[in-house]
Amino acid sequence: MKAIVINAYGNDDVLDYVDVERPEPKADEVLVKVHVAGVNPVDWKIRDGLGERLGLKLPIFLGGEIAGTVEKVGVDVRDFKAGDAVYGTVTSGGYAEYAILQRRGYANAKVGEMVTKPQSLDFENAAAIPLGALTAWQAMFDLANLSSGQRLLITAASGGVGSLAIQLAKAKGAFVIGMASGRNEAFVRDLGADEFVNYTKQHFEEVVKDMDVVFDTVGGDTFERAFHTLKKGGFLVTAVQFPSEEKAQEFGVNAARVYCKPNAEQLAAISKLVDEGRLKAHVSTVLPLTEVKKAHQLSESGRTRGKIVLQVAT
């Protein structure tokens, strides 16, 4: 089968499109024929050297989310069969013609979780959901305990994660302020944001105040300035930064980093919102697996609206 692998860390030149042996599922695993794989910033960050800092061993098979059909099930798997349409997350190996997913739990770091693909989504749109939606869910609901009526700021509201976070937060009943560049205002408002902040025209920390929760996927200076927008006792949760406990104490708030974990129960709840029409994916670019370098370049540019996906099989 074809797969994308890196044998060294570096720029997109280290991405190799290679032939590898198709894996076989163990007793509690499922072999999925990948139709579409989602592209996420963590993919090129791992390629760029994050993988080494995380202790990953080369070679590394990239890709963290997929949508496809079940090809073969392990002997202990009873609730899926060949031909079922599924989607989910994998720790590695999503950029490939086939991927192994574990049906229950995530004790094995090489595999992820999956559920039945929402009937209302095609494979392209389904592949844009799992990792981003689970990241937003676990950040806002599990860590920050966002609840109905609370005020939420999303710092990168037009991105693959932020666009899903807006919709999940609105489904929860939160008041959402979305931040992005001015060209994305209509897009962010159409997703359900109650207010919009154009970070290119305003110092957001001067106009946004008394937030219960801030969800940050930008990091750097944006993350640091976001502390000024929170009320006492508020919560700043980030997907990209390592929060300082000292700074959180200085502002009288809580701060944490979200690490997305496979969770079939949460993904099933997300699927229900999709089929109810309360959550939709926004795919900006579809590229063949052979153009993974271009996909990474687009993702690294930071100017993509919604999600980039790789077409693996038709």
Image (spheres, rainbow, N blue to C red):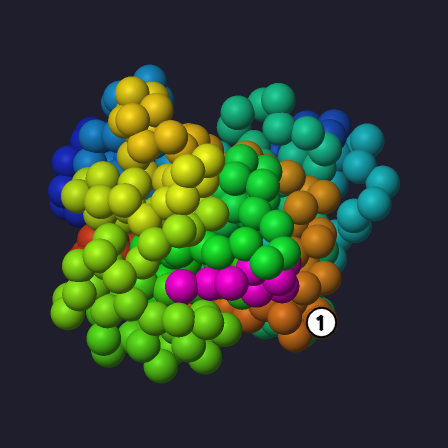
Q: Position of residue 135 (x, y in %)?
A: 49, 45
Q: Position of residue 291 (x, y in %)?
A: 27, 60
Residue placed furthest toward the right: 78
Judge whether residue 159 can be spotted in this image.
no
Q: Using the image as rendered, state which of residue 115 and residue 135 is in the foreground.
A: 135
Was residue 269 drawn as part of the magenta stretch in this picture?
A: no
Q: Is residue 183 above or below residue 50?
A: below
Query: Is residue 193 placed above or below 64 in the rendered structure?
Result: below
In this rendering, position of residue 253 left or right of residue 97: left
Q: Residue placed at 63% from the left, 56% from the top?
A: 148
In the picture, residue 182 is in which quadrant?
Answer: bottom left
Q: Is residue 272 visible?
A: yes
Residue that carries the numbered disc 1 in the rendered image? 276
- Residue type of the residue flagged with mark 1: Glu
Is 127 on the left-hand or right-hand side of 119?
Answer: left
Near mark 1 (Cα within 10 A), the count class, few <14, some 14-19 or many ≥20, is few
Q: Magenta region: which residues?
A: 170-177
Quadrant location of residue 196? bottom left
- Closer to the camera in the image, 178 or 26: 178
Q: Is 172 covered by the magenta stretch? A: yes
Residue 161, position as x, y percentages in the image = 42, 55
Q: Residue at x 22, y 57 (%)?
A: 206
* 144 with respect to 178 (left or right): right
